[in-house]
Amino acid sequence: MTFDALAMHAIRDELEAELLGGHVEKLFLLSGLEVGLRIRAQRHDHNLLISADPQFARVHLIGETVRRLSEEVTPFLLLLRKYVRDGRITSIEQPTLERVLRLSVENRLDDGSTAATSLIIEIMGKYSNVILVGPDGNVLDALKRIPPSLSRQRPVLPHLPYSPPPATEKLNPLSPILARQLAAAARQVKPGSPLWRFLQESVNGLGPLAAREAVYRAFGEAQKAVTQDIPWQELTAALDSLLKPLQTRQWGPCVVVREDVVVHFAPYLLTQFPEAEVERVQSMSEAVERANADRLKFRPAEALRAPLRASLKARLDRARRKEESLLQALSRGEKAEELKQFGQAILANVGQIAHGQESLQWEGMTIALDPKLSPSENAQRYFREYAKSRDAAREIPALQQAARLDREYLEQLLTLAELAKSDVELKALSRELAETENRRQEPAQSRPQVGSSGRSRPGPKPKPGKPRVEQPTGTVRRLTSNEGIQILVGGSARGNERATFDLGTGGDLWLHARGIPGAHVIVKLGGREPSRQILLEAARVAAIHSQGKGSAKVPVDYTLQRNVKKVKGGPPGLVTYSGEKTIRVDALEPEEDLT
């Protein structure tokens, strides 16, 4: 379901009618990618949701009251409170057929001065953003800061001038010569290509649904192919009917419902679907809200996500610093032999070292001496440092391995926390994090210990009558593919372990996004060969449930479950695997083809 430029125009007209002149009474961060505003206008309270989520970016009014769901305070939130909260909305503008909305807000600051700022909402898939621009045209801050390393053409950072998204080079659908332009462009297209796709890629402002609707209105079939004899005037006439509300502002929003689930929404009446599936609605906001009902239902989970995210980030920072410290210690350990040579050089030159001498030149080396110590004492000092560095160097590789596993485990938990869709999953992740923290604080004698052989020795048995602490079982999502095959997705670290090793069997297919944290995915094949379709579906699920969500061409590894092994002595969910193959899939859209 795409929030295209026509949907934005319908929303803009609705917001202008409802919110213009209203006062922003409250303002919240609903999540790291969502902002909620409560606006008092025309003697009514209105609740505005703005989302820059790469999968579900949108802006619309919602029926429920917006409430604070995150305790996180960011510089962007503080600036919104200063410049937008308590301000008056003076204008709501949208460039024609662009997915950009500008809310102009006039506010009185603490010093008594008046500031006119703009809250710019860009709904553009993975490039979606919410940007606060000052009266001088410079960016005050943004929900997503974009440094030059990510975009040389259009960085979005505080103090830089705001520049709008670059204009597309597509055809203007309002042009009187559009039919002639389409006919010329079609000559470069392979005959038999879908006409709707050609239309979407050639004409500005059209999403896939709008393009298919125009083709259906013109020819009675949405899947018509490009041919040399297309009557382009009929197609442009159908486009004119779709675009007419740009002048009249008389929109006809509707939703398409299948099995009680909204699968499409549009600001115009959809004719390409059976009439029984199409429902008219009162407003465009209602259409978008119904299409995102499941995501709105799970928004209270954000109240759990914020503290979990903060805790994980703090622990992850500590784990990364520990890795860096061990790397530096290893570097010092590699100089142990040099310290030994210094001590030997001093002993070899005892007779030549004068009392109070501060250094010794020896075979091109300058050896520092403590002038308060005798030559023998200086040599012994170097030998002691050599022994300490040598012993540390022997222990550091094992400590590095443990630190690396801890860091990878925390990265896994943080990714799964960002992807969690319900409070059940977030609570499971919180329990797992608490359980690992408790184990870290256990007395050493109560933990399994490692002997010289490398095998673990159990710690003391628990006292009789003392209940054993129940370990978190982990959450697992269950999906069904288009072929009716069950797909399991780990929702937490222990959920990953459970999906792979408890619910998966040797002949099942195992998938995971390559080289990045994410969920384990199991396809219950029972030894059968996977079809190309199920492989693509499952790989897409793995990509969407990983750190690669929102990206194109995410590499996903797949192999049989029997080739996956737990990391010996490692945290839950960390595995090694062999015999894998790699497939690249798109993670830009949700898994709408799964039930």
Image: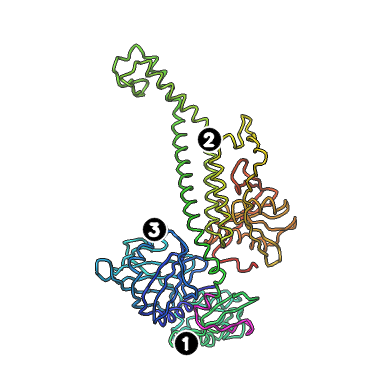
> Could you give the CA–CA distance between mark 2 and mark 3, rounded to whole angstroms?
36 Å
Which quadrant is the N terminus positioned in? bottom right
Say if 306 sits above or below 169 in the image. above
Residue annotated with mark 2: 397
Say if 147 sits above or below 52 in the image. above
Residue annotated with mark 1: 250
Is 38 a magenta residue?
A: no
Q: Is residue 337 left or right of residue 277?
A: left
Q: Earlier in the sequence, mark 2 or mark 3?
A: 3
Cβ–Cβ under 8 Å for marks 3 and 1: no
> Could you give the CA–CA distance between mark 3 and mark 1, rounded to whole angstroms?
41 Å
Cβ–Cβ under 8 Å for marks 2 and 1: no
User: Dot 2: what SS?
Assistant: helix
- Which mark is drawn over residue 482? none
User: Dot 1: what SS?
Assistant: loop
Q: Residues within 10 Å of mark 1 (few under 14, many from 20)?
A: few
Specify the amino acid type for callout 1.
Answer: Gln
**Quarter of the view holding residue 28:** bottom left
Could you tell me which residue is drawn at 44 percent across and 73 percent down?
48
Is 287 a magenta residue?
A: yes
Residue annotated with mark 3: 147
In-front residue for pair 85/197? 85
Kindly tell me whether residue 169 is visible in this rendering: no
Specify the amino acid type for callout 2.
Answer: Pro
Q: Give the range drawn in magenta.
A: 270-289
Kindly tell me whether residue 423 is visible in this rendering: yes
Specify the amino acid type for callout 3.
Answer: Pro
